[in-house]
Image (cartoon, helix red, strand yellow):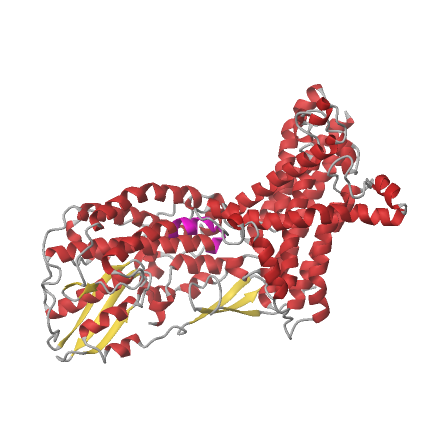
C-alpha cells in the first residue's frame, strides 16, 4: 500500500540564519528531498544604477562600496578602472601598487568571511570566529589608512582618497607573516575534517560546461576546473607584473566542481593573494597619490565595458557617457547575481541541508545581487 | 538514603518522595545553571573570546540573569498552534530528562531510588523525551519545527538501539540491572572499572579490554546523538532549521527545553561513567579510609562521580565547538551501518565469554 504523500512548500528566508542576507528561497520538498528551488531576490534593492544617472562620476564611488559590502575596495577599484579607461587616464605607479595591495587584502578578507560562514552553514562555529579574528586585522589596516572599516570610499577615479598610513607597510608585512600559519590551522580544523568532507564533497556538482554556459565566474568557475582569472586573462592595473598561480578545482575529495572544491579554491587563493602582496609591498614607489585626480570628470561621448576580478567573480561596469558630467547609464554585472542563477539547478534532488551547503559554497552577497 | 530519611521523617511515602527529589534540587538544578555558563566559557575560550564578563566576577551570574530575563518574557503561544500539546510538551521533556536522575547512584549513601530495574527505568524514561519533542514540533504548526521534530524523533529512536545493545552487554557482563550493584562490582582501583574489563581476571580480562573500549565509544557516540549535540544536532540545526522543534517557544518554556538539554547531557555522562568508569568509585582509594573518618567516604564518592560526569560533559562541549554537523542521511548511516553491527558483534562475543 502506498502512503499518500504531499509536496511541502517551505519558505526559507528572507529572515533566516544562513541565506547570507535577505534572500528568500521557495523550496518544494518531498520529505527532506528538494524537488524545486525558486530564489526570490530584491529585498535589498536600492536603485544603485538609477541613482548613478543623477550623480557625477566621483560621487558614484561611495555608492559602489555598498554593492559587495564585503569587498568595497575591489568595487571602488573596478569603478575607478572603468572610468579611467573611459577617460584614457594614466595613474601614477604608486597608486597602482597601493590599489593592488588593497584589492588583494580585500580579497583575503572577503574569502575569510566566505570560508568562516561556510563553516557555520555546515555546523562548525569555531572556524568562523577564527576567520573573523584574522579579518579583523585586515580591517584595522584599512581603517588606519582610509578611516573606515567596511565602506572605504578609498580608491578614487585617478588616484586615492589619501596616502597610506605610515604604519601601513609594516603592518601589512606583519599580517602576511602572521596569516600564513593560520591557513594551515584552518585546513586542519575544517578543510580536512572528515565530517566536513562528507557534507561537501560530491554535493552540488557544477560541471565545466554548465558553468561556462551560465556565465559563472570567480572561484566558483575555477572550482569547476576552468583556469580563468581576469588578473591573468585580461590584465588590468599592474597585475601582469606579479607572479601568481590560478588555483583550480581538482576534485581532490570527490568530483571536480563540487562544494568542497569551491571551498578549497578559496583557501588556495588566500595563499596566492599573500604572494602578490609580498611582491608588491616592497616596491611601492614614491609619488603623490592625488596628483592625477582630474578636477572635472567629463568623459567624451562613448561606452565602455570594463571588468575586474572581484573576490566573488567578474565585476563589470558598463558605462554610457553622453559627454556631460553625469553618466547616461551605469550597468553593473554583479558576479553574485550571475553565480546565483545556477543555484536552482544545483539544488535539485539534494536534501534540505544540502541547499544550505550549496548556497554557502556559491558565496553570494545580497547587496550586490539586488544593488 | 531512603532508610535514613525514613528514620528522620517517619513516613514511608514522604521519605520516598524526598529521596527521589533530593538529587534534583540539591544538585541538578544548580548544575544546569553552571553548565550553561561553562558551555559559554568553554566555547569562548576555544574561540579566542572571553565569553560573558559583565554579570558578577567573570560573568558567573550570567545564567541567573538570563533565567530572570526569560521569566519576565511574554509567553507567546502562536495562534495557529495546538494549545494543549504546545503547553504540555516542555513539561514532558523537562520531567523525563530530570526523572532519570532518580535511579542514578551518586554515592553508596546518596541514591534517589535503588531499584533493581534501574537501567531499564532509565532507558524507558529517557525514551519519553521523543514524545515531548514530537508533541512540541507538531503543535507549533511551523514547518521548520516539524522538520526538526521528525529528524529528532528518527534520530533518537535509531540511536536508542545501539545504546540499548551496549547496555544489554553490560547487563550480561555484570548480571544486574541495578546501577548500584554494577557500580559496586567495580570497586577498588581503576583497573577494575568495566572499561578495563571489570572485575574479571586473567585471560578473560585481556580479551574484554578492547571490547569494552569499543563499547564505551559506541555508547558515547549514541548518547551524544540522543541528547542532540553536535555533530548530531541536526534536529536543531541552527543554520538550516533555525532552531528546530523549539523555534516557536519563548520565555520560560524555552528555558525548560534549554535546561533539559543540559540536564540530559549530565544524565548520559553519569550513566556512562556508572557503567564504564567505575561510577562513584575512586580510582585510587579513599581519604576517609586512610584517615579513618567513615562519613568522608560518601562525600568523596560523590565528588568522584560528579567529577567523571563533568569531564564527559566538557568533552561533549569541546566536541560541539570543534566538529561540523552531519547530514540527516549520514547520521542514519553512522547508526545503522556502523554502530548497530559493531554493538551486536560485541554483544555476541561478550555473550560467549560470559558463558565460557
Return the x and y of residue A76 as percentages of the image width and height: 23, 64
**Between B334 and B8, the one nearer to me in the picture:** B8
Q: Is residue B6 left or right of residue A316?
A: right
Residue under the point 44% across and 58% down: A358
Q: In the picture, which quadrant includes the C terminus of chain A?
A: bottom left
Q: What percent of the width, then of the height, locates residue A111?
A: 34, 54
Vertical placement of A189 versus B240: above or below?
above
Q: Quadrant of residue A67?
A: bottom left
Q: Depth check: give the residue in front, A283 or A370.
A: A283
Name which residue lies at 55% across and 61% down. B241
Vertical position of residue B130 compared to residue B337: above or below: below
Identify the residue at image location x=67%, y=63%.
B136
Q: Is residue B243 visible?
A: yes
Examine the residues drawn in magenta and state their main secondary structure: helix
Q: Residue furthest top?
A: B202
Query: Residue B208's x, y, as percent?
Result: 67, 27
Amino acid at each position: 500500500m502506498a502512503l499518500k504523500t504531499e509536496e511541502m512548500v517551505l519558505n526559507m528566508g528572507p529572515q533566516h540564519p544562513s541565506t547570507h542576507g535577505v534572500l528568500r528561497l521557495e523550496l518544494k520538498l518531498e520529505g527532506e528531498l528538494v524537488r524545486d528551488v525558486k530564489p526570490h531576490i530584491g529585498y535589498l534593492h536600492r536603485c544603485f544604477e538609477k541613482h548613478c544617472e543623477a550623480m557625477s562620476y566621483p560621487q558614484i564611488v561611495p555608492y559602489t562600496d555598498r554593492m559587495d559590502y564585503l569587498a568595497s575596495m575591489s568595487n571602488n577599484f573596478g569603478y575607478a578602472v572603468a572610468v579611467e579607461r573611459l577617460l584614457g587616464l594614466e595613474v601614477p605607479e604608486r597608486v597602482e601598487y597601493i590599489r593592488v595591495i588593497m584589492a588583494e587584502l580585500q580579497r583575503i578578507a572577503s574569502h575569510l568571511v566566505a570560508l568562516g560562514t561556510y563553516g557555520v552553514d555546515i555546523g562548525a562555529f569555531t572556524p568562523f570566529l577564527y576567520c573573523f579574528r584574522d579579518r579583523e586585522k585586515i580591517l584595522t589596516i584599512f581603517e588606519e589608512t582610509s578611516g573606515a572599516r567596511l565602506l572605504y570610499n578609498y580608491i578614487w577615479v585617478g588616484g586615492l582618497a589619501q596616502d597610506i598610513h605610515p604604519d601601513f607597510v609594516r603592518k601589512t608585512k606583519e599580517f602576511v607573516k602572521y596569516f600564513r600559519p593560520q591557513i594551515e590551522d584552518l585546513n586542519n580544523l575544517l578543510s580536512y575534517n572528515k565530517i566536513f568532507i562528507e557534507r561537501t564533497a560530491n554535493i552540488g556538482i557544477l560541471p565545466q560546461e554548465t558553468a561556462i554556459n551560465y556565465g559563472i565566474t570567480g572561484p566558483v568557475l575555477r572550482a569547476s576546473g576552468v583556469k580563468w582569472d581576469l588578473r591573468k586573462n585580461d590584465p588590468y592595473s599592474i597585475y601582469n607584473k606579479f607572479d601568481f598561480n590560478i588555483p583550480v578545482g581538482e576534485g581532490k575529495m570527490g568530483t571536480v566542481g563540487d562544494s568542497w572544491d569551491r571551498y578549497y579554491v578559496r583557501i588556495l587563493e588566500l595563499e596566492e593573494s599573500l604572494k602578490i602582496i609580498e611582491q608588491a609591498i616592497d616596491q611601492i614607489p614614491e609619488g603623490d597619490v592625488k596628483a592625477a585626480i582630474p578636477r572635472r570628470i567629463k568623459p567624451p561621448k562613448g561606452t565602455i565595458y570594463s571588468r575586474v576580478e572581484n573576490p566573488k567573480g567578474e565585476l563589470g561596469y558598463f558605462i554610457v557617457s553622453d559627454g556631460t558630467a553625469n553618466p547616461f547609464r551605469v550597468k553593473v554585472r554583479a558576479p553574485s547575481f550571475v553565480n546565483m542563477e545556477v543555484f536552482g539547478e544545483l539544488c535539485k534532488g539534494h536534501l534540505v541541508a544540502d541547499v544550505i551547503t550549496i548556497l554557502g559554497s556559491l558565496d553570494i552577497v545580497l547587496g550586490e545581487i539586488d544593488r | 538514603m531512603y532508610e535514613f530519611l525514613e528514620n528522620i521523617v517517619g513516613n514511608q511515602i514522604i521519605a520516598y518522595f524526598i529521596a527521589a527529589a533530593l538529587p534534583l534540587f540539591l544538585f541538578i538544578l544548580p548544575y544546569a545553571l553552571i553548565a550553561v555558563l561553562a558551555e559559554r566559557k568553554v566555547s569562548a575560550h576555544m574561540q579566542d573570546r572571553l565569553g560573558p564578563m559583565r554579570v558578577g566576577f567573570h560573568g558567573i551570574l550570567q545564567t541567573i540573569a538570563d533565567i530572570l530575563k526569560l521569566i519576565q518574557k511574554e509567553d507567546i503561544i502562536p495562534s495557529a498552534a495546538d494549545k494543549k500539546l504546545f503547553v504540555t510538551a516542555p513539561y514532558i521533556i523537562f520531567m523525563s530528562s530530570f526523572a532519570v536522575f532518580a535511579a542514578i547512584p551518586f554515592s553508596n549513601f546518596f541514591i534517589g531510588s535503588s531499584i533493581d530495574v534501574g537501567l531499564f527505568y532509565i532507558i524507558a524514561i529517557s525514551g519519553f523525551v521523543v514524545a515531548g519533542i514530537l508533541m512540541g514540533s507538531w503543535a507549533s504548526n511551523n514547518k521548520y519545527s516539524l522538520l526538526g521534530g521528525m529528524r529528532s524523533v528518527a534520530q533518537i529512536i535509531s540511536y536508542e538501539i545501539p545504546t540499548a545493545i551496549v547496555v544489554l552487554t553490560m547487563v550480561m557482563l555484570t548480571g544486574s540491572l541495578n546501577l548500584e550493584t554494577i557500580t559496586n562490582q567495580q570497586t577498588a582501583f581503576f583497573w577494575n572499572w568495566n572499561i578495563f574489563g571489570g572485575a574479571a581476571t586473567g585471560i578473560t580480562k585481556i580479551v574484554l579490554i578492547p571490547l569494552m573500549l569499543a563499547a564505551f565509544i559506541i555508547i558515547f557516540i549514541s548518547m551524544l546523538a540522543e541528547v542532540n549535540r553536535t555533530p548530531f544536532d541536526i534536529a536543531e540545526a541552527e543554520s538550516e532549521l533555525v532552531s528546530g522543534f523549539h523555534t516557536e517557544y519563548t520565555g520560560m518554556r524555552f528555558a525548560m527545553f534549554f535546561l533539559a538539554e543540559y540536564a540530559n547531557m549530565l544524565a548520559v555522562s553519569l550513566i556512562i561513567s556508572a557503567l564504564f568508569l567505575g561510577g562513584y568509585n575512586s580510582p585510587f582509594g579513599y581519604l576517609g579510609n586512610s584517615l579513618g573518618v567513615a562519613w568522608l567516604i560518601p562525600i568523596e564518592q560523590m565528588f568522584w562521580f560528579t567529577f567523571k560526569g563533568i569531564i564527559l560533559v566538557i568533552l561533549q562541549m569541546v566536541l560541539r565547538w570543534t566538529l561540523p554537523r552531519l547530514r540527516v542521511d549520514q547520521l542514519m548511516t553512522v547508526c545503522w551501518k556502523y554502530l548497530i553491527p559493531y554493538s551486536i558483534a560485541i554483544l555476541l562475543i561478550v555473550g560467549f565469554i560470559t558463558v565460557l
